[in-house]
Image (cartoon, helix red, strand yellow):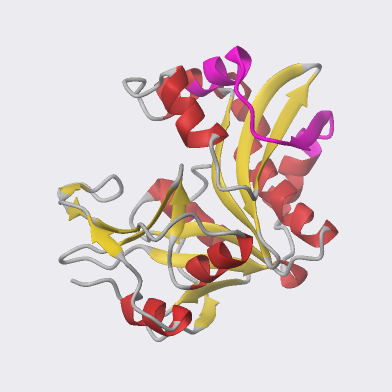
Amino acid sequence: MASPYLGLVVRQFGRALPLLKSGDYPCPYLAGRTASVLVNYAGEPDATGYQQFMDSGFRRAGDMIYMPSCKSCAECVPIRVPVDEFEPSDSMRRALRKNEDVDVQIGEPAYSDERFELYRRYQSQQHDSVEDSTPENYERSFVQHLGFTEEMTYWAAGRLVGVGTIDITERAVSSVYFFYDPAEARRSLGVFSVLCEIELCRRRGLPYWYSGYYVADCRKMSYKARYQPAEFLHGDGQWRRFAPRSGGDAR
């Protein structure tokens, strides 16, 4: 199945973009399926260009701009939240109260041994994988960026408990990745980080928070539906209100 957003890409940019299609690989979200992506290789966009990419269904991973293009599946749906209309639920407000002692700092993405060891612990306990957890891969994924990326770090009693990578355009904050100390699971740091990112949108006067792709049958992707109201991107290029079923909080 070709990407449902490919025609939108051509219309958005007014020309056919040079796109490279990957080979098939095991889908990281839905067991037993294969996946592939379209990768843009026209050069690194600025913040304005990346906003256009996001509005066309693309996301960023490291220095790669991509969107899913799977043969028999279109379950990855771009999703965003209009922040002026967002109101946290009761459970989200509890997460705010649990983290009243957390200091949130915003700055340039950076590497440190403290960040890397936190990332390794998170990968080991949350995803049962550390095989790709090397300092080089960490820097490639979270420190090298396209020039409009910031890092949000979360500190409790002077100790690093969470790190979030975000892209900032003239219209949005886009959540790239967040990891936290598994020993602090009681804090609901994933929920807290989302609320902090949405609040950053409000403080900077940005209308949207982009959370990537929603996948209904994947718990680690379906949590995004909890943040309402939400809009999702149709293949005709229109963002419409979305009230999907949610698989709970995996962030």
Asked whether the viewer can see residue 227, the reply is no
Asked whether the viewer can see residue 112, the reply is yes
Rendered view: 17 above or below 139: below
Foreground residue among 45 and 210: 45
Q: Going 75% across and 59% down the picture, which residue do you hit?
A: 201
Say left or right for 45 vs 86.
left
The image position of residue 28, as x and y in percent, is 28, 44
Say left or right for 28 vs 150.
left
Foreground residue among 219 and 29: 29
The image position of residue 178, as x and y in percent, is 56, 38
Magenta range is 97-119
Say left or right for 229 vs 159.
left
The image quarter containing residue 231 is bottom right
The quarter in which the N terminus is drawn is bottom left
Whether residue 100 is in magenta: the answer is yes
Q: Going 36% across and 20% down the picture, which residue do you hit?
A: 130
Whether residue 101 is in magenta: the answer is yes
The image quarter containing residue 171 is bottom right
The image position of residue 236, as x and y in percent, is 40, 86
Q: Looking at this rendering, what residue extends furthest in the front direction?
A: 43
Rendered view: 5 above or below 130: below
Q: Going 42% across and 46% down the picture, which residue do you hit?
A: 220
Q: Going 22% across and 72% down the picture, which residue do you hit?
A: 2
- Exactly how many numbered labels are in the figure? 0
The image position of residue 69, as x and y in percent, is 26, 64
